[in-house]
């Protein structure tokens, strides 16, 4: 088991992120090493439970923790109040106390919901993330955003609540469906585009090795992504400023997800598409050269991400933008590029340019 | 309009509590003076809306704020997920943004739910308390505890989330039903018993003037209660230590509320009863003299608080204790007195003593 670790620096709420192979078999010792005491509840879903739950449970029990399993249905459509209620009900039926440690074993949906349950159960209990998808490892498990969807939009109900520990076990990637791995790569490429040109080049050079899950480049990739995210989150925990840079591709992406009912596009796919659109918009504003746009889009394509948006009227996009929770004063906010590795936040995008980009990316 | 103010010191989350007559007519200016900008939503209930909503709305509009009214049904039975959903739905239907300021205009139920909605809507928006009951003014509006009830118990789902401002307008007490005023006095007396012998004496000496809502003693009373609560909360925001002292009377009180279905006893009445039982338990442990117990119970009685608990089997009390969210390691925690003005936290209460106290206080 290779183990690397880095710390997200948030003062009294700082926490480590561990990276390695087979870490889930040592989770009990790791909780002990952090001084976390109490009963545990492991929240997971029907897909992940048969793969990894027993290993996590064994490790916890060997270290003397009691374990309450809470198995949720799988899928984004279950990221809602009704499923959250299942978690609360199970915890309360079992009379779990304030010393409860909630572990999220799964992808972003499980992590976001478990984190939100941890933030709100008895006004807050300890929370550990064991992300099992690439997307969750490089994005949703780090930074403390938790929440559920509302019929009117994604993640509209939630809280900022930091985990005590994040464990990225590379082994979970071996069972991850190819399509989900590719979707996760969208967020990986995002870090290069918004912040780190050298990392972008590393991804260009190592795409094949990464796709084949070679441990060294995967480890470097996970570590770099989490380090960038950790640094941004440390500087702006509650997204009042530069944390918004992490939403590169997301204004378009959220609109695509919303307009297609959340069941056709994976989040990462929609974000990948959104990044291609944002790169194009950046180019048309004169901020990104044609060459830079091309290598950005090309890396997304080579990774296997979709490059045609659904065919939807531009005014419906506009409507979806206005429902995005990052809206301020009625105007959507866009994250655009002024070069690879350099993202900026802007609300000043000419309507015509925006409409053109949407139309030009629609599948014919 | 008399105005006093004190600050609850919580670093970057510090906030003022204002006390005075007719402050609600100036709420708009006050928000401006604090630099709070955005659209406002005023959450209130069907009882309070006809009394005060128009005044709050006028003041906000005069200062240039838009106002979305959200009127909830009145009563503790509505402090639940379904009512919380009404708040979310209204905010989202109106496309309220992250700059939203949620104002709670009402008693503890409105304040707790609005605060929880503010903590979780778009992962947190600004929040202002305008408590309209004595209980809310001296207790629930200060300290950042927010939440809703679950079928298995009170306040089991919630968050610590601090308001930006608390406005205690004495005028709201003039329309408060007598029974509710008396119930609020239980929490007032609590501060004297747990922390401040001189304040306890002040209450003994001024009970009549307070009951007649004479401004000077009322103002001193509110100010003292909030100062004590603010001080305790500053030292222990998330209730890991001495904040638990504020739960004096609450272990018994919560059990009484739970066992009577929350519809017979007001919270303050149950807490008052619980304090009498805790005083008796303190005495039987040899920690409180008979004379001190007697003047404690006597002040509760003179105020008009009930002094007979419902007739309920002691094992049902025990059952209710074990469901209390302050339970640790399966054992309920009691706050007891070692003299008036000096409370302590303990888990070491002999079962027999506890059962005797419960039996001896039951109505025959």
Image: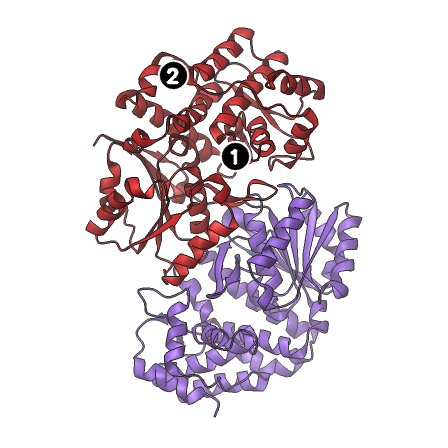
Chain colours: A purple, B red
Q: Position of residue A301 (x, y in %)?
A: 55, 86
Q: Which residue is mark 2?
A: B203
Number of labelled discs? 2
Please tell me which residue lies in front, A244 or B321: B321
Which quadrant would residue A354 be assigned to in this image?
Answer: bottom left
Label number found at residue B123 = none
- Compared with A42, A350 (above or below) is below
Residue A36 appears in the figure: no
Q: At 46% from the left edge and 47% from the top edge, which residue is drawn? A: B116
Q: How crowded is the residue under tag 1: few (<14 C-alpha within 10 Å), some, or many (20+)?
A: few
Instruction: Tell me, for residue B263, which label it has, or none.
Output: 1
Q: In the drawing, does residue B277 fall left or right of residue A178?
A: left
User: Residue at 43% across / 32% down in the picture?
Assistant: B139
Q: Residue B74, how many percent across, how many down? A: 42, 42
Which of discs 1 and 2 lies nearer the camera? The answer is 1
Query: Farthest front residue?
Result: B364
Say which element carries label 2: helix
Residue nearest the observer in this picture, A7 or B230: B230
Which residue in the rendered view is the most extreme toward the top?
B291
Where residue B346 appears, x then y in whole percent?
62, 24
> How far from the left and from the top, in percent, is residue A57?
76, 54
Q: Please report whichever mark, 1 or 2, sits nearer to the chain's N-terminal start.
A: 2
Marks 1/2 in contact by CB < 8 Å: the verdict is no
Quarter the C terminus of chain B occupies: top right
**Quadrant in the picture for the N terminus of chain B:** top left
- Residue in view at x 68 percent, y 45 percent: A93
**B47 in relation to A360, above or below:** above
Residue A48 vertical placement versus B30 (above, below): below
Question: Considering the numbered disc 1 on the image, is that residue within a helix, a strand or a loop?
Answer: loop
In 3D space, how far apart are the residues under numbered discs 1 and 2 (Cα atoms)?
Answer: 29 Å
Chain ID at mark 1: B
């Amino acid at each position: 088991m290779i183990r690397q670790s880095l710390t997200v620096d948030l003062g009294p709420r700082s926490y480590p992120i561990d990276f390695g192979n087979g870490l889930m078999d040592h989770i009990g010792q790791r909780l002990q090493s952090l001084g976390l005491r109490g009963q545990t509840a492991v929240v997971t879903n029907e897909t992940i439970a048969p793969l990894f739950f027993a290993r996590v449970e064994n490790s916890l029990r060997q270290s003397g923790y009691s374990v309450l399993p809470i198995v949720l249905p799988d899928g984004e459509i279950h990221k809602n109040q009704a499923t959250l209620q299942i978690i609360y009900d199970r915890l309360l039926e079992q009379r779990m106390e304030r010393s409860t440690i909630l572990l999220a074993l799964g992808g972003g949906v499980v992590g976001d919901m478990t984190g939100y349950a941890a933030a709100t159960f008895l006004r807050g209990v300890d929370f550990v993330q064991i992300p099992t998808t690439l997307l969750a490892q490089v994005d949703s498990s780090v930074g403390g955003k938790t929440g559920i969807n509302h019929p009117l939009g994604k993640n509209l109900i939630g809280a900022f609540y930091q985990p005590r520990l994040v464990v990225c076990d590379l082994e979970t990637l071996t069972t991850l469906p190819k399509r989900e791995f590719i979707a996760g790569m969208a967020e990986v490429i995002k870090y290069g585009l918004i912040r780190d040109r050298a990392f972008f080049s590393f991804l260009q050079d190592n795409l094949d090795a990464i796709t084949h899950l070679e441990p060294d480049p995967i480890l470097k990739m996970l570590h770099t992504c989490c380090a960038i995210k950790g640094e941004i989150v440390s500087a702006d925990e509650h997204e009042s400023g530069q944390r918004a840079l992490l939403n590169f591709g997301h204004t378009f992406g959220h609109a695509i997800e919303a307009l297609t009912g959340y069941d056709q596009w994976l989040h990462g796919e929609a974000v990948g598409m959104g990044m291609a659109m944002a790169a194009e918009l950046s180019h048309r504003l004169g901020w990104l050269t044609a060459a830079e746009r091309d290598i950005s889009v090309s890396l997304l394509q080579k990774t296997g991400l979709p490059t045609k948006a659904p065919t939807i009227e531009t005014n419906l996009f506009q409507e979806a933008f206005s429902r995005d929770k990052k809206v301020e004063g009625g105007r959507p906010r866009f994250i655009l590029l002024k070069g690879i590795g350099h993202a900026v936040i802007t609300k000043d995008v000419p309507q015509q340019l925006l409409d053109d980009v949407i139309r030009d990316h629609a599948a014919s």
